[in-house]
Amino acid sequence: MKPNSRISLLLLMLLFVASAFAQRSELKKAQEFLANEEYYRALEYYTLAGEKGAQFNTQVKIEIARCYFNQKNVTEALNRYDEVQDNLTGQDIVNFASCWHQEGGFELAIEWYEKAKSQGANPIDMDDLIKACKWAMENGSFNRDVVVNPASLLVGDQSFGIQYYEDGVVYSAEKQGRSKEVDRSGKGFLNLAFSKLVEGEIQEGSRSFSKNLESDYHVGATAFTSDFSRIFYTKPVRIKGGDSRLKIFTSVFDGEDWVDERELSINSDEYNTAYPAISPDNKYIYYSSTQRGGFGGKDLYRAEIKPSGTVGKGENLKSVINTFGDEEWPYIDKEGNLYFASNGHLGFGGLDVFKAEKQGDGFGEPVNLRQPINSGKDDFGYVLDPSDPTRGFLSSNRLGSGNTDAVFTIAPPMEEEEGDDAPPIFGLDEVPVVDMQEEAPVETMPVVVPAVDLSMFPGSLQTKITSTFNGVVIPGVTVEMRDANDGTLIATGVSGDDGRVTIVIPDEYKKEDQEFEIKFSKGDEFNSKRMIVNIMEVEDINNNGLSLTPIFKDDVLDDIGMMIIPYEGNEITKEGLAVLDELATYLSLNPNIVVKLNGHTEAKGNRYNNLNVSQDIAEKAEQILISKGINDEQMIPRGYGERYLKNKCKRGVYCSDSEHLINRRIEVVVWRMLK
């Protein structure tokens, strides 16, 4: 070997060793952050290791999925867990089940909750979660008496925890006038902001709520006495050993600002205490705590408020309210009813908002407020307008991937005024995000209140899948929903033993022109079905169900079930007429067989006209068969327009005439047997 060659080889070996060392170093740091539950920092180093060429083994892939799950990025966590599902154990199985639960894949969630039992998970807790999934499948319909929309309070990257205060609202939002600083979860630090209300509507502009209450870290989750003379709020406090605990503080208003800050006696360095709420008579403070002796993770408590502002000993609200999961963000309305967020009661997956009516000195059984108040993600911080109980606010991470919280308005449906032809504005792209991190002082912040009525759109695909041949339900059908515009996978689901499947439609896809590509498949047992539908057509699928044609083991029957009759314009082609001759022969020899003649068109021209064309051509095929002596009871002509395309040629995609022609066809489907 020449000297130069040896030097080059040595340099390559040194570079390889250095690269491998760097990869191991980044992975080690990532795993250290993961062990300390600093998931945001862990993901940073996993990403760095990947950029430096690290090949992740199964265990590392599971660790990355775990980070996304704990960062509340449920969609990404689901995708990551799905890649390694055969290797999941312990808590990761529960996490994977929870992802499916929150994404609306209730049947799969049940399957994985069942698996979690054999991996050491508490079987009672898992059974409760399975009950929640079954409840969600039966209670997915929207309450049409309420409309939930993103508020204009998208300040910085996140805003949440809103409360009514005098002539406005107070909420947590990222700090103004400073460089971007983040906490251990990668979120910007929060202080209290204020915006005015006029006739229940948030006005343009926001400001810091209190200079005295500003902190270098988080401040939020507020509550006020009825006369607004005293505030209670939550903030983290560093304790001995370097950890932090959430604690509740109180201050009084001196006419200019909030003063005399005091820590409440219900706090402890041993556990978290947070999310205060005050009863209308100012006698009790309700709060969430992780102290020992409760029923699960976070429980709700109450304590008596003394005239001095100090509080007595906290008492647990007992098992009617508290579960094995988390109960937090309490709120008491003017009648004394309790609202709170929980992931332990029957719900849609994450935190849901519940109402427990006042009964004597306690509360009745909690009731889920259902959709659209609740979603598959975390919904919390529910409050009502003191002057109009039909309006209010809540906080939720339902937008996007789920790792950002935002404020949503609650209101009754808008009454249409006669002669008002202004079209509504749909889609979340209309909501501006106002950055509070700019250094320049800003007196007001322009906001735009979007007229987005998300409740008018279907909340999910919920349908029953049956066989075209005998009408029996089909379990185990895989359903994929994609954005028809760019092919992005939105969600997947699998039909259960009852043939039902549920896929929740994320809020960001609830807009007037949204189209989905939906595929139904079950291996080699049934012919797959692919369809392009507008979001408003999802309700038709929910109401009418969907059928798949079996792949028959009988060769002749299977051949009949796969017949394609082509046509051009309004006429069946010569080749199509030959196929009809074959079909007529078969139907005459088998007078007990019923077939559907499903007409389809290409995705060009007027949609409604295409629907009519497909129905007309299907009826034309039926008349030809009748002329050949076939009983009309053996045929069902049905037009589907451009809903079921055979190739890529959806609207907006250039295709040649020959490619479009593939979609102009009549499909023969073996439907059932005559009695």
Image: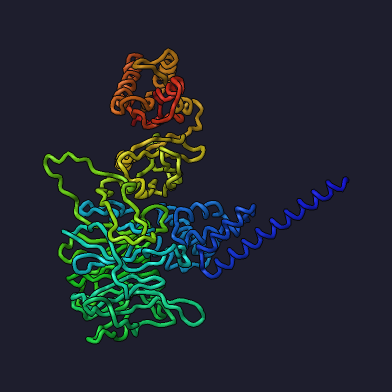
Q: How was this image coloured?
A: rainbow
Residue 57 rendering spot, x and y as whole percentages? 63, 56
Quadrant location of residue 169? bottom left
With 268 as the anchor, is 143 left or right in this view? left
Q: Residue at x 38, y 75 (%)?
A: 295
Quadrant placement of the C terminus: top left
Asked if residue 555 lies left or right of residue 598, the reply is: right
Residue at the outermost right position: 1
Residue 563 in view: no
Q: Nearer the viewer, residue 592 or 287?
A: 287
338 and 628: which one is in front?
338
- Count of picture labels: 0
- Nearer to the camera, 472 or 348: 348
Q: Quadrant of residue 581?
A: top left
* Place of residue 318 in the rendered image (x, y in percent of width and height, measured from the top left): 32, 77
Depicted 327 relative to depicted 54: above or below: below
Asked if residue 164 shows in the view, the reply is yes
Decide: is 249 above or below 385. Answer: below
State the image coordinates of residue 666 (x, y, percent, origin top left): 39, 23
Kindly give the residue lying farthest to the left in the view shown.
Answer: 418
Q: Position of residue 39 (x, y in %)?
A: 51, 64
